[in-house]
Image (cartoon, helix red, strand yellow):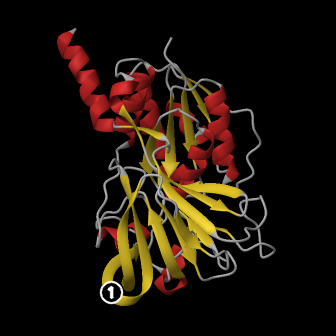
Amino acid sequence: MTGLVGLIANPAAGRDIRRLVARASVVPDHEKAATVRRVLHGLAAAGVEKVAYLPDRAGIVASALDEAGPLAAEPLPMHATGEAEDSAEAARLLAGAGAAVIVTLGGDGTNRMVAAGCRDVPLVAISTGTNNVFPAMVEGTVAGLAAGFVAAGRADPDAVTRRTKKVTVDCGGTRDFAIVDAAACRDRFAGARAIWEPGQVRRIVLTRASSWNVGLSAIAGALCPVGASEPAGVLVDVGDGPAVTVPLAPGLVVPVPVAGWRRLALGERVRLSDGDGTVALDGERQLTPSGRGACAGRGGCAGPVMAAVTMDGPRVVDVRAAMAAAAGAVRTA
């Protein structure tokens, strides 16, 4: 019997305020369900027999099970609330159940929450969010095949998965992380959470930076590109200085003045802020000053906020490598 595969489809992904203030599009639930159907077909073709999934309140996965075929698909034993924590709780349950792979549908924010609970279980992340730097634009069928080949042992997990980076953030005894970027913002309240105004950003620490990405990563990508697997990070100070023109949100191209930037060594701690504003993690304000709001359910932050790029982020499946490994196994059989 092949290993268990997890499915986490976030119904809230791709629905933030950037649909109003920029030109981001909505990935409707029926399209997410169609993607899940294709994932299920790929999993079944790879020989997967069992799937466990987040019982999201929109019924995305449940509505796709009419084409599950021979797969035994069961909802995880949890009560979904519609909050971001659902993804983290589902990942924790899947890791505890011994899942071989987790397939996610969402953006950077969704995968940050999954990374909080998945432990060492590798991810196949399908892009359906707003900022999609971490997840890949991959066809659902291929994503399902790749995940299935890993779960079925037709692709060696050690050969086709890699460890990613994260930004560890310490704030007055509170520790959190981002998988792409952590940004100090001038706002004292989380508000609508999503970032679309560069004037509110002071400093950014990033795990990766590419000019072809959308969001804060594009700022650093125009200055100091750093690859997803490179053992380094980037620090950018937004302020008085030459401007770079970047896609800060889908359809929103703006000039961003930059005061300075430099590469960061792995583990190098830098002061992200003095704790007098919000801190955004992967494009959404999460940490707020002490007494000014919630910090992901763990209270506000007090004092300086320190950040460092480390190499202990979630593992991800290299979809192309997994497909090539499975094809190679067939040719040599």
Q: How many marks?
A: 1
In x, y percent, where is residue 159? Answer: 33, 27
Task: Give residue 151's position: percent from left, percent from top.
Answer: 45, 23
Residue type, label 1: Ala
Locate the C terminus and report the quarter of the image it occupies.
Answer: top left
Considering every residue shown, the one lying at the far right of the view is: 291
Residue sticking out furthest to the left: 331
Q: Secondary structure at mark 1?
A: strand
Residue at horizontal 25%, vertical 16%? 329
In percent of the image, x 68 and y 81: which residue is there?
188
Residue position marked by numbered label 1 in the rendering: 243
- Image height of 125 relative to 4, above or below: below
Q: Which residue: 42% across, 18% down? A: 152
Q: Is residue 270 visible?
A: yes
The quadrant where residue 206 appears: bottom left
- Among the 4 quarters of the image, the one containing residue 327: top left
List the single residue furthest toward the top: 333
Residue 309 point in image, percent of width and height:
47, 55
